[in-house]
Image (cartoon, rainbow, N blue to C red):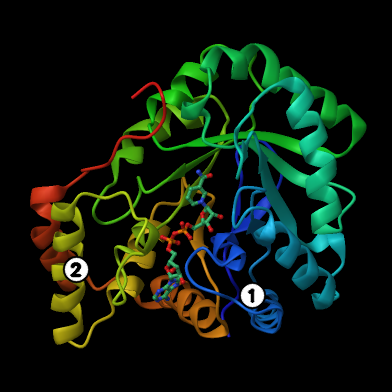
Amino acid sequence: MAKMELRELGNTGLKLSSVGFGASPLGSVFGPVSDEVAIATVRQAFTLGINFFDTSPYYGGTLSEKVLGKALKASGVPRNEYIVATKCGRYKEGFDFSADRVTRSIDESLARLQLDYVDILQCHDIEFGSLDQIVNETIPALLKLKDTGKIRFIGITGLPLEIFTYVLDRVPPGTVDVILSYCHYGINDSALEDLLPYLKSKGVGVISASPLAMGLLTENGPPEWHPASNELKAACQAAAVFCKEKGKNISKLAMQYSLSNKDIASVLVGMNSVQQVEENVASAKELATAGIDEKTLSEVKEILKPVKNQTWPSGIQS
Ligand code: NAD
C-alpha cells in the first residue's frame, strides 16, 4: 500500500501526514463517541500512516483532550512518532487569553492528554479576544512555555483571515510558527489561497482544517449548530445530492480538493470512526495515484458558484 505523504510544516522541521486527525469529534461534538470507538479510530489512523492529531480544551468541554489522551496511550505508539497540537484561550466557560490563564491551561491539557509536552500550542480563535493582547501578552507567555519544554511550537487559529496578517505583522519573525485556518480551503470556500504566498514568505507553517466545511460537504449534512446561512447549507446539500446521484462521494471529492495544494502541510479532518479514517486516507492515496475527478469537481464547483467564498461572522472584530 502507498505510504501516507508527509509534508514539512513551515520552518518547524516537523513532517506532518497530509491527512491530519481532527479530534473535535472525539469530544462528541458531532454525536456521541464511545471510548472503544475512539481508541479503534486512533489506532487505525496510526496503522494507515496518520501522525498528526489536533485537539483543544474547548472541544466537548475538555472531553476531546481526555479521550484523545486515552486513545494515544492505548495505541502504544512511541511519543516521538506522532505530533500533537492543542490550544489555549478558548474554554467552555468562555475566552481568556491572559498570560496567567494560558500558562495554567497547558498543565491542564498535558494532564488530560497524559503527555509531557505538546508539539504545538495554538491560541484558539483569536478573533474573539484582543489581537493586541495576543501579540503583547499571550504569545510572550507561550514563548516562556517553549523554554520549559512543555510546548515545542506556537500557533494561532481562527476564522477571519485578516487576524493572521494582523498578528504576524506585529511579532518578531519566527515567533509564531504555525497558523491553523478552517473552512477556507475547500470546494465552496478557498479564500486561504490568496494568503499562502504571504505565509510562505514569513516561513509560517499552514494547517488547513475542516475540508468538509464542518459537515456541509457530507451526505449526512452539517450538525444543528452549524453557523452557515441557509443558502450555503442548501447549495452544499444540492452538491451532495448531485454527487450521490452520480454514484460519487462529495466528501471524497472535498478531501481531495483540499489535499491538492502542497503549500498546506496538513488537512485536518474530523473523524470519529474507523470507516471515516479509512475513507479519508483512501481519498489521499487515490489522489496521489489517479488524481482528482476533474469532471465532477467542475460540476460541483458550478453548483456552488453562487455561494463561492461565502462565510459567516466570527469574533468581536467582525
Ligand atoms: P470537518 O470539515 O473535518 O468535518 C467533520 C465532520 O465530517 C464530522 O461530522 C465527521 O464525522 C465527518 N466526516 C469525516 N470524514 C468523513 C467521511 N469520509 N465521510 C463523511 N463524513 C465524514 O470539520 P471539523 O471536524 O470541524 O474540522 C476538523 C478538525 O480541524 C477539528 O476536529 C479540529 O481539530 C480542527 N479545527 C480547528 C478549528 C479552530 O482551531 N478554530 C476550527 C475548526 C476545526
Question: Quick one: label 2 or label 1, which is nearer the N terminus?
Answer: 1
Label 2, on which residue? 237
Residue 33 location (% of width, % of height): 59, 76
Residue 242 location (% of width, % of height): 13, 76
Instruction: State whether label 2 is within 8 Å of ligand 1.
Output: no
Q: Nearer the viewer, residue 131 or 96?
A: 96
Residue 308 location (% of width, % of height): 17, 47
Q: Is residue 171 visible?
A: no
Instruction: Assess disc 1: are there few (<14), some (14-19) or many (≥20) residues with their C-alpha within 10 Å of its C-alpha.
Output: many
Label 1, on which residue? 45
> Height in image: 261 above or below 198?
below
Left or right of 189 in this view: 40: right
**Residue depicted at 65% across the width and 79% down the height:** 34
> Height in image: 249 above or below 15?
below
Instruction: Assess disc 2: are there few (<14), some (14-19) or many (≥20) residues with their C-alpha within 10 Å of its C-alpha.
Output: many
On the image, which quarter does residue 176 sit in? top right
On the image, which quarter does residue 4 sit in? bottom right
**Residue depicted at 9% across the width and 62% down the height:** 303
Count of numbered tags = 2
Image quarter of the C terminus: top left
Amino acid carrying mark 2 in the image? Gln
